[in-house]
Image: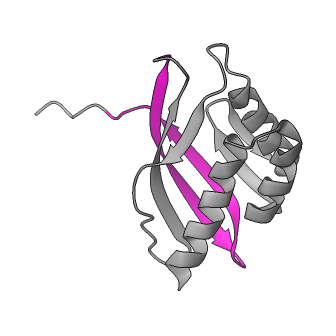
Amino acid sequence: MQEETARSAIDTFISAFNASDDSYVTALLSQALTSDVVFWGPLGRSEGVEAVERFVLDIRRHPAGTGTMVRCSAVDMPDEWARYQWVFTTPDGGPRLAGTDVVHLRRSLIDQVIVFAGEIEPSAS
């Protein structure tokens, strides 16, 4: 049950990147995130739904065009932490970015997001 709750919050969060209109982004994020969410993104740490909204809107306005964000793995959830992999693809074969997010849930909502963008290179043996 806990994994299903996490999956629902994560999929709602991801759906904000794919909303049909920017005006839906805030409502989707508010359904998935706590108001005091801590977001560790590529540009550092920020707090609050508004900060995450700015990040999502920036991604939606990618110079190569509006892309698509999808969860491309199962949700792995030991206790209140969950991780999943995602892929962001821009139209017409434009840039593609993949990564892994780690999220913490509190009362069925995400209260922390840690974004690991890009592939991790194998270690040298």
Residue found 69% across the figure and 64% down from its top = 110
Which quadrant of the figure contains the C terminus?
top left
Numbered range of the magenta stretch: 94-120
Q: How is the image coloured?
A: one colour
Closer-to-camera residue (122/54): 54
Residue found 57% across the figure and 40% down from its top = 69
Closer-to-camera residue (4/110): 4
Q: Is residue 48 visible?
A: no
50 in relation to 8, above or below:
above
Residue found 81% across the figure and 42% down from its top = 53
Q: Is residue 50 visible?
A: yes
Instruction: Describe residue 86's horizontal placement relative to residue 37 as left or right.
Output: left
What kind of secondary structure does the magenta stretch mostly adopt?
A: strand
Residue most extreme to the top: 63
Label total for image: 0
Instruction: Describe residue 99's horizontal placement relative to residue 59 as left or right.
Output: left
Residue found 60% across the figure and 59% down from its top = 11
Q: Is residue 71 magenta?
A: no
- Residue 95: x and y in percent read 49, 19
Q: Is residue 111 magenta?
A: yes
- Residue 58: x and y in percent read 75, 27
Instruction: Describe residue 22's horizontal placement relative to residue 95 as left or right.
Output: right
- Residue 79: x and y in percent read 50, 78
Residue most extreme to the bottom: 1
- Residue 87: x and y in percent read 47, 38
106 in relation to 115, above or below:
below
